[in-house]
Image (spheres, rainbow, N blue to C red):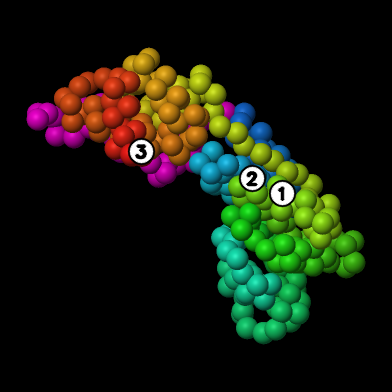
Amino acid sequence: MSKIKDFTTRFGFHGVPFTCEIRNEDRYVNDIYQTPIDHLYRTVDKRMCGALIAPAGTGKTSVLRALIDRLPEARYHVHYVKVTSLSKRDMCREIATVIGMESAGTYPALVKRLQEHLAASLDMDGIRPVLILDEAHDIRPDVLAMMRILTNFDMDNRLVVSIVLTGQPPLAKLLKHPGLEAVTHRLALCATLRTLSRPETTQYVEHRCRVAGAASCPFDTGAMQALYEIGRGNLRATDQLSLKSLETAHDRDCDTVDSNHVAEARRLLWPV
């Protein structure tokens, strides 16, 4: 049994590393993420619509947080809606609730009031409304088609609201649906994310250890290789595996994480 109280003390962390609770300023900076952030920001700044498509666990939430952080509250009202398989009316009600509008009424009436509410935000307050529809790969085609109506102001001669669709790769297939050409043509951007390469995975793990307070990275070369081979550059899998490997090494009273600890962590996390 280790005499050191916990693994954070052993490895010099000031808190638990590799969790989703990380400040935006401490995020891992890489062109994989920075380029989509910049492109999305420019799209929203021009009051246009865009999409972010990424496999699960590749940093979509981190990109969205960074984007929102770049949109000053004095100029933008950002509204986040997590999509589920809703009808058009129910989706309108969900959006209405999020933006602080009464959600009762028929579908046509809701759409009209949503447009009026969004336009008022810009006309009366000078604040640009932004709708982030997350998990958009789960949205029904007929509901997604509603995006064309929500963004149609003065017969398409005016830009009022930016809609950012975010979701997993099936969203790309959904946007190719025969009945959604009008929606796809309204997207000024379709950004994507990928998994990390082997060197990038090492940089990422070292970065997360550093921002968590460690003076040096406790993972040896073999452990880094194992983290990549198992996690394949997926951020979520790498975080889970790294954290469990640290705990495993501590339980074995080791001051360095090696490939055996990573292999044991995999068995504990994802038993075959």
Magenta part of the chain: 1-30
Dot 1 falls on a residue whose secondary structure is helix
Name the side, left or right, on which 89 lies relative to 222. right
The residue that mark 2 highlights is 169
Q: Position of residue 41 (x, y in %)?
A: 68, 44
Q: Amino acid at mark 2?
A: Pro
The residue that mark 3 highlights is 272
Question: Compared to 207, does 69 lie above or below?
Answer: below
Are dots 2 and 1 in contact, CB under 8 Å?
yes
The residue positioned 70% from the left and 66% from the top of the image is 143
Q: Residue furthest top?
A: 221
The mark nearer the N terminus, 3 or 2, is 2
Q: Quadrant of residue 260?
A: top left
Magenta run includes residue 19: yes
The residue that mark 1 highlights is 173
Secondary structure mostly seen in magenta is loop
Q: Amino acid at mark 3?
A: Val
Cα distance between the residues tagged 3 and 1: 31 Å
Neighbour class for label 2 at 10 Å: few (<14), some, many (≥20)? some
Q: Position of residue 8 (x, y in %)?
A: 24, 33
Q: Give 24 or 256, whichever is nearer the viewer.
A: 256
Q: Give 26 or 141, whichever is nearer the viewer.
A: 141
Q: Is residue 70 visible?
A: no
Q: Position of residue 241 (x, y in %)?
A: 37, 33
Name the side, left or right, on which 59 lies relative to 192. left
Q: Is residue 178 visible?
A: yes
Q: Amino acid at mark 1?
A: Lys
